[in-house]
Amino acid sequence: MSTLDALWTELADIKDELAQRDWFPGTSGNLSIKVSDQPLTFLVTASGKDKRRRTTEDFLLVDSEGNAVDPTHLRASAETGLHSKVYQLTDAGCCLHVHTVDNNVISELYAGEGQVTFKGQELIKAFNIWEEEGSITVPIIENYADLKILAESFGKAIGPDTRAVLIRNHGITVWGKSGFEAKRHLEAIEFLFSYHIKMKSLMQFHGGQPSLI
Amino acid sequence: MSTLDALWTELADIKDELAQRDWFPGTSGNLSIKVSDQPLTFLVTASGKDKRRRTTEDFLLVDSEGNAVDPTHLRASAETGLHSKVYQLTDAGCCLHVHTVDNNVISELYAGEGQVTFKGQELIKAFNIWEEEGSITVPIIENYADLKILAESFGKAIGPDTRAVLIRNHGITVWGKSGFEAKRHLEAIEFLFSYHIKMKSLMQFHGGQPSLI
Amino acid sequence: MSTLDALWTELADIKDELAQRDWFPGTSGNLSIKVSDQPLTFLVTASGKDKRRRTTEDFLLVDSEGNAVDPTHLRASAETGLHSKVYQLTDAGCCLHVHTVDNNVISELYAGEGQVTFKGQELIKAFNIWEEEGSITVPIIENYADLKILAESFGKAIGPDTRAVLIRNHGITVWGKSGFEAKRHLEAIEFLFSYHIKMKSLMQFHGGQPSLI
Amino acid sequence: MSTLDALWTELADIKDELAQRDWFPGTSGNLSIKVSDQPLTFLVTASGKDKRRRTTEDFLLVDSEGNAVDPTHLRASAETGLHSKVYQLTDAGCCLHVHTVDNNVISELYAGEGQVTFKGQELIKAFNIWEEEGSITVPIIENYADLKILAESFGKAIGPDTRAVLIRNHGITVWGKSGFEAKRHLEAIEFLFSYHIKMKSLMQFHGGQPSLI
């Protein structure tokens, strides 16, 4: 199996797993895996596919501009520019963008602050953060209909310690050095979101925020 | 495979997927796919079947009056008249009716207003609504025990931009040009419902409605 | 396939489906299917089995006293007496007892009233109740550790229109003429419970009870 | 099949089932099964594995110090010391450590009390507690980054009737004489947690605690 085939299989396996979790509602969401660095190329979701099916047309190979490397009738996902930003600005090898009710709720609740920070949770170690008082901050950006403006804003939100970016009511983008790490980061951040929402709903009467944030 | 067989398979696949989501509780719900336009015929759920099983008697072909086109011992779903209305009033090729806890909750919460509107959510694009400030409105009608009166009321609720109708405490009916599009609309609207309910539960103390609606 | 084998398979299929829904937490719950009327015999869950596995020792045939009809090392579920009451007092052909978080919550919330009534919900038709203003009432009894006292109290709660009984913080027992009907009743009542809890949580600030009950 | 193989298979089956429940978010969690008593050896999760896959490198055999019994490139889970404490202080044959949103929420809500007690629930019988007024208490300890200090604190929390220990925002550790019993205990305690959280969210307006605790 060539490297490209192996990376395709890795990405298709992740897609199957996330589809099984129902993290691509209404055909939303997209994923990519880096194939080469110089020049940058990556496999990315083709537009308009049913992500519950596994086909030979689920992904296509694109360059840093999101253009197909080989002639194809497939179109790259409209949000390919976000994946490209991630590969250009970080050491990511895989990038996942999904919508969940909980990540959209968090993005709306904390849109005013422009970010949300979690601490005091063992799951933070999933991000290779090992300090006793370790915390993780996820920037939240506005959702611009113009995808070029969105990509610009998205790129500016990525700092040296950023592992994920929330777009307001437009899901989360998470990455990792490998597909395995990207998936681990995604599972961990969704866990933190769900935990936070449940704590917050239980503490509404006790004066605002859970102590964890 | 003839066209009819292909459409049967498409509808059976959608049924399997919705059954797996548990969107047919207590054998409720029904689905249909259009077979011909002039005259109108469509495959529709046979009455009283366990929707978790896949059998050769799950659907039957009916005309615009809901009568079986060929002799059969099967009875069309009692709610076939709603499907017929959809095919007569819209360009739908597939129509889905399901009960979920969340769509029933929304139908009850906003029954007084007679409709519910969502905006500011990326998932609205699943309905091919691309404007920055795009919104989607779902009419809510009362649940009449008399199915003829229900079908009349249902038909009157369908305007040129309507993609779905809620019946109060009686689930949602969603459609699309194809089975794929109908399913995408259904997943997206259920996501919007679940999001809205979670936001609302978190904002009870902060004065009523989430800002999104 | 003999009738006994066919009934065994029907019950085992239902068990698999309910286990997949996670409705037997901690090996709780039990199910039965009637085999003969005169004298009464029924297949019932053997005690202490992992309900996620399907084995030839999942059920045993018992009489109206809960005694094994044939020599066996298997013990009938400690709650076999409840199943026997159902077959003696109703026309049930199948009886299901499961614990869910939601049915236990409802049993606790309305224990003081001794019953809970649902109306205004389409899903009520799953119980073959077709009137416009149809309602369904589920009695709630206290949970006695003494299983004989529990069975007495359980039997007294069953009236001519009863289709299900809640035991306080001890799950629900539901029945139907066939396995298919029992399952339909169970799915419908759990839907009504989940709907009611969600409505109630959203309406805490608006003065108590949802309008539906 | 040797005893070791049989125990490996038992543990791998439990891992598959818990992974399917999504109780190892972000590769968190670990499990073990005792192989011998004198000296103590047990199979325990290897570090850094995707728990949704089943491989021949998922577990390794370790001694009471957590050191591999045979030469291997695998590393035992960093939390192996907690499992060792359980085998040294109790009659456990299997030990499970998982993170769920609900167990973390409970650990945070009652961290101040240092424990949480449940009573009045049929599911308490899953712990072989049969008294009418039986109750189960789960100690809650702080989450120390230093795993030696954590293991010390964990050991001190285990009394003669303890079946599970919560670590604040770091999941639950549950055990049983066999894999089957450990799984039953885990399912039952998670049910009690979920029930308690739902009751509490419904009773916020009625003055604090549900009556059950």
Image: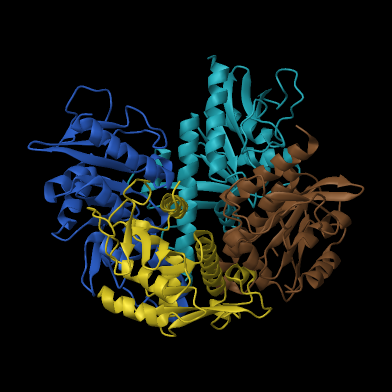
Chain colours: A yellow, B blue, C cyan, D brown
Question: Quadrant of the rendered structure where residue B142 is?
Answer: bottom left
- For residue C173, above or below residue B197: above
Residue in view at x 23 percent, y 36 percent:
B7
Residue A34 location in percent, x, y?
42, 62
Quadrant for the N terminus of chain D in the image:
top right
Question: In the drawing, does residue B68 fall left or right of residue A78?
Answer: left
Q: From the viewer's side, name the closer residue of A201 and A100.
A: A100
Question: In the drawing, does residue B143 fall left or right of residue D22?
Answer: left
Say how many tags the image has.
0
Residue A212 location in percent, x, y?
60, 79
Tell me, yes or no, if residue C90 can be seen here: no
- For residue B60, above or below residue A125: above
Question: In the drawing, does residue C183 fall left or right of residue D163?
Answer: left
Residue B103 location in percent, x, y?
36, 57
Q: From the viewer's side, name the closer residue of A74 and C211.
A: A74
Q: From the viewer's side, name the closer residue of B9 and B41.
A: B9
Question: Quadrant of the rendered structure where residue B30 is?
Answer: top left
Q: Residue furthest left?
A: B38
Q: Residue furthest front?
A: A38
